[in-house]
Image (cartoon, rainbow, N blue to C red):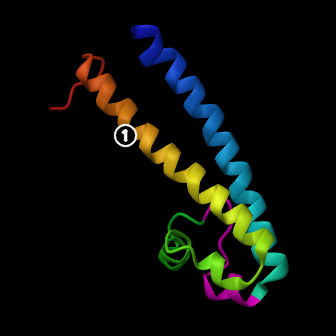
Amino acid sequence: MRILVLGVVPLLWGAWALFTMALQRQFLHRLKSNHPNVWISLGRPAAFNSIPLLRYARWFWKCGFDQTGDTELAYIGNRFYAASFILLAVSGVWVIAAWLFGYIEFR
């Protein structure tokens, strides 16, 4: 169980994080090139500085990309949305599992 919790799951999490980052980069590139007014109104989000932009996060989590009328952006956005949700869920489950098996202590 130790190898699973401390080795396999973090390795798979890292691979999934790279996949999610690639989707984010593709999503933001398409948003910037095909919908520059939307991109500017969201605060010009970029792959490594989009987390602090509350407008972008709110727009993204409310699936604002579906209202652009761009089916390719909506497709990439939905994949990025699902990948992000899975990444957050796995992160939470991994921390809980590590805590339950005694590998992490909360004080």
* Quadrant of the snapshot with the N terminus: top left
Q: Position of residue 5 (x, y in %)?
A: 42, 18
Residue that appears at 68% across and 58% down: 24
Q: Position of residue 85 (x, y in %)?
A: 50, 52
Residue that appears at 65% across and 76% down: 65
Q: In this view, does 50 lie to the left or right of 98?
A: right
Report the number of discs. Answer: 1
* Crowdedness near tag 1: few (<14), some (14–19) or many (≥20) residues, C-alpha within 10 Å: few
Q: Is residue 98 magenta?
A: no
Residue 40 occupies quadrant = bottom right
Q: Where is residue 78 in the image (x, y as percent from the top left)?
A: 64, 62
- Vertical relation: 19 (above or below) 30: above
Q: Mark 1 points at which residue?
A: 92
Q: In this view, does 3 lie to the left or right of 107?
A: right
- Vertical relation: 30 (above or below) 99: below
Depth order, front residue of 57/90: 90
Residue 14 occupies quadrant = top right
* Tag 1: amino acid: Gly
What predominant SS class does the magenta segment belong to? Answer: loop
Residue that appears at 73% across and 90% down: 37
The region drawn magenta spans 37-49
Outermost residue toward the left?
A: 107
Residue that appears at 59% across and 27% down: 12
Q: Is residue 107 left or right of residue 32?
A: left
- Vertical relation: 53 (above or below) 22: below
Q: Is residue 49 left or right of residue 95?
A: right
* Quadrant of the snapshot with the C terminus: top left
Label 1's element?
helix
Q: Where is residue 4 in the image (x, y as percent from the top left)?
A: 46, 14
